[in-house]
Every structure is written in structure tokens, then in C-alpha cells.
Image (cartoon, rainbow, N blue to C red):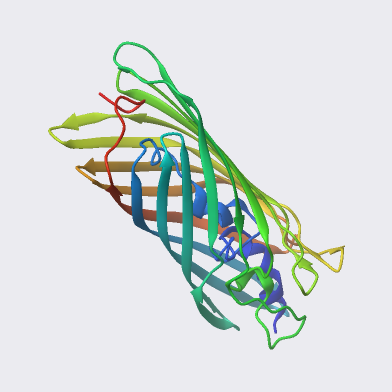
Amino acid sequence: MTKLFKYLIAMQLLIINAQNSAFACDACGCALGGFNFGIIPQNEAHFVGLKYSRAHFYADMMHGGELEFSNDLYQRMDFMGRIALKERLQINAILPYMYNRMNGSHEKEQLSGLGDPMAMLNYKLIDQKGNPMDAWLHNLWIGGGIKAPLAHFEYAQSAQLINPNFQLGSGSWDYLALANYTSMKNRWGINLEAVYKVNTANSQNYRFGNQYNTQASVFYMTKKGNTQLIPVAGLYHEHGGQHTFEGFLQGNSGGRLTMAQIGLQVQTGTWMLHGNFQNPLVQDFNSDAHVTIEAKGRFSLTLVKFIGKKSGNNVFTL
């Protein structure tokens, strides 16, 4: 195992390890990507859906006068579902499938398979109905949930086993909290969201650092016939704490990243398609000074099929 491969733990910080489910890195909030809802949950219908996400990292270092490098690609497909128990109460569930690939000058690794499933119970604390053309309307969801250790995890400080961030699961029971606020008037709106994840130690005494992510977006809604078009732009930030093994902090783990994001959401009838692109603005990973780590752009595409009738006027009713 080369030194660069060890340092790549820091680079893999950001994409959900069984995220976080593998966005494969559980060090930062991207590991929470599966539970970023944005403006999707603004009606009371059931739904099923698919969300494809991909993220790319690059790292290099000079070792013995030779440049060692690695290009890492993390891809994730979330199978999503929501059950609307009541108008203000919903259960959301996600089962991820991940494909992680490391392609470097000295190391080539690949992992694929099911990640750790997550489930969340959300409650609509504020639900102002009416016409947003007349006044500001406000909508606030709060929720809590759990991530179960379904995917495989094995830890060893040897060249034979892939490092913890690259694996498909964390091996631990972890807990999530969410708040999602939306306000709209005259076709313009804002969406604020925060997700926090508390990670516990697994059976091998390895513990991923706690994670959170936040985002703030501005959107504009247009409507043509039965089709809604919603362009979105904003900022996204994620942070992951250092990992521990048997209570000791692990080097080259944890970090933070801020990204600009743009997206477009299209809804027609009972179908919704949402595309989102994120580009790094500021990044600070906990890595050694002679190692260069870069997070590249991220992309996601979500397809949702709503089932059942939506309630009357809500914050998105024009």
C-alpha cells in the first residue's frame, strides 16, 4: 500500500460512505446526500423515486521524487419512497446502491453493492396555505431518523483491506435530524435545509466523525399548462468530524467543503424530474501539507412518481 493510498482517506472524506452510504465517504455531509430534500417534499402525496449521484476527487503527492496520484469516482443510486401517514406526517426511506472506483498511479480499486439503508419520520411544523401571489407563505418540516448497518464493513490497517472511507457501509447504527424551511411569494421562493448525522462506533470500534450539511437556495416558479418549471440556485456546505479507532483520532479524516449549486426541477402531472450540479468554492480537508486533494464537481438527477392526491392549497400552489 503506497503512502498516497493512505492519504486518500482524506480525499474520500466527502462522498457518503454508505455515507454515508458510499457517497463512499462518511467524513463529510455528502454522506447525507440521500436525505437532502430541497423543495421536493412540498406536497402530501406518497411517492417512489430514483436518485442518481456522482462525485469526483483527485489527489497527488511527491514520493521519492515520483508523482503519485489518484482519480476517485463515487456513484450512487438511491431507491426512494415516501408514505404520507397524515397531511403533516410522513415516513421517508432510502436504499442506496453504490459503485466506488479508485484509479491511481499505484492503486486501482473498485467496490459496488448495496449501502446502508436510512429511514426518517418527518413532521410539518408550519403549514401556511393560501395564494403566494398575495402574501408570503411559510412551510417548515422537521424530522428524525436512523441508518442501519446493512452493508459490509471490515477494518484493518493492512494493504489487504480497503480503507474505511471507501467501503460500502459504516458497520454502525447512526442517527439523523433534519429541518427544511420553504417560503414563497409572487413566484419567488427560498429554501433552507440542514441535516445532522450522529455516528456511533461499530463492532470493530471504528467510528466515523459526526457530519452535517446545510444549503440555502433561491428559486422561481413558472407554470405552462400542467407543467411547473422551477430553476434553483444557491450554496451548499458540508462538514465531517475526524474519525476515531478505539477512541483515538485518525489522521487524514474529516474536513469541510462549500459549493455553489444550480438546478432545474420539472413537474408535470404526477411525475417530477430534478437535476442539480454543484461546483466547489472553498475546500479544506484534514490532510498533510504535502498532499494535494481536490473535490471536483458533483451531479445528481432525481426522478419521482407521486401517488395519490395532493392536498389543497400549499406553499407551492399558484
Instruction: Please give left or right for residue 292 compared with residue 281 in the image.
Output: right
- The one of 125 and 206 positioned closer to us in this rendering: 125
Residue drawn where x is 58% and y is 73% of the image: 151
Residue 47 placed where, x, y %? 34, 50
The furthest residue to the bottom: 160
The furthest residue to the top: 134
Whether residue 228 can be seen here: yes
- The one of 271 and 125 positioned closer to us in this rendering: 125
- The one of 67 and 72 positioned closer to us in this rendering: 72
Q: Is 239 rendered above or below residue 140?
A: below
Residue 216 placed where, x, y %? 50, 34
Residue drawn where x is 68% and y is 84% of the image: 161
Residue 223 placed where, x, y %? 19, 30
The furthest residue to the left: 225
- The one of 222 and 257 positioned closer to us in this rendering: 222
Whether residue 284 can be seen here: no
Quadrant in the picture for residue 64: bottom right
Instruction: Please give left or right for residue 191 compared with residue 14 in the image.
Output: left
